[in-house]
Amino acid sequence: TVNNVQNGVMAKTGYGNIVMNNVAGVIKTSSANGNITVNAREIIPTGELLVFTEKGNIKISMPEDTNAQVQAKTVSGSVFSEHSITTKPRTMKFNRQTISQLRREASGTIGTGGSSIKVHTNRGNISLVQS
């Protein structure tokens, strides 16, 4: 568990959960097997948030007024967001494969864009929630 860091933080574990509370700045965290929870105090315009786990759920809590470019993807699971994400227009057929793909990835802009948020899990769900 990491608490109250303003100028960026990096945490990595092979097995086990990672929890970050009240963090800001450049945030990088990864786990081979474990859940990751990031409670960000703010996402600064020049900040970067990189979260990866091979097997586990990811939950990122961000302020309602967050501005960022986001890429969230899971191979086996779903992506959920309480933040509105503006996606680029694309043309696709709506069938089982594309509907499944839409559940597994979200890419676009939160607010006016700015900082970079990249989130990936191979086996687990991703939740982007408002704090």
Image (cartoon, rainbow, N blue to C red):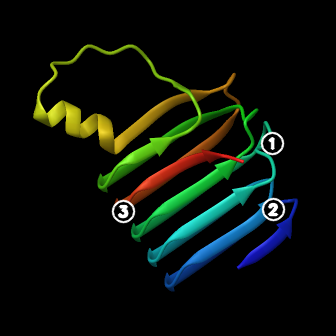
* Displayed quadrant of residue 105: top left
- Residue 4 occupies which quadrant of the picture? bottom right
The picture places residue 45, in percent across and down from the top left corner, at: 79, 36
The residue positioned 60% from the left and 75% from the top of the image is: 18
Tag of residue 22 = 2
Distance between the Cα atoms at labels 3 and 2?
24 Å
Using a 10 Å C-alpha cutoff, classify the residue at mark 2 as few (fewer than 14 neighbours), some (14 to 19) or many (20 or more).
some
* Circle 1 SS class: loop
- Earlier in the chain: of badge 1 and badge 3, it is 1
Which of the two discs, 1 and 2, sits closer to the camera?
A: 2
Q: Is residue 20 above or below residue 121?
A: below
Q: Quadrant of residue 89?
A: top left
Number of the label disc, if any, that sits on residue 44 = 1
Residue at 60% x, 54% y is: 60
User: Dots 1 and 3: beta carbons under 8 Å?
Assistant: no
For disc 3, the marked residue is 124
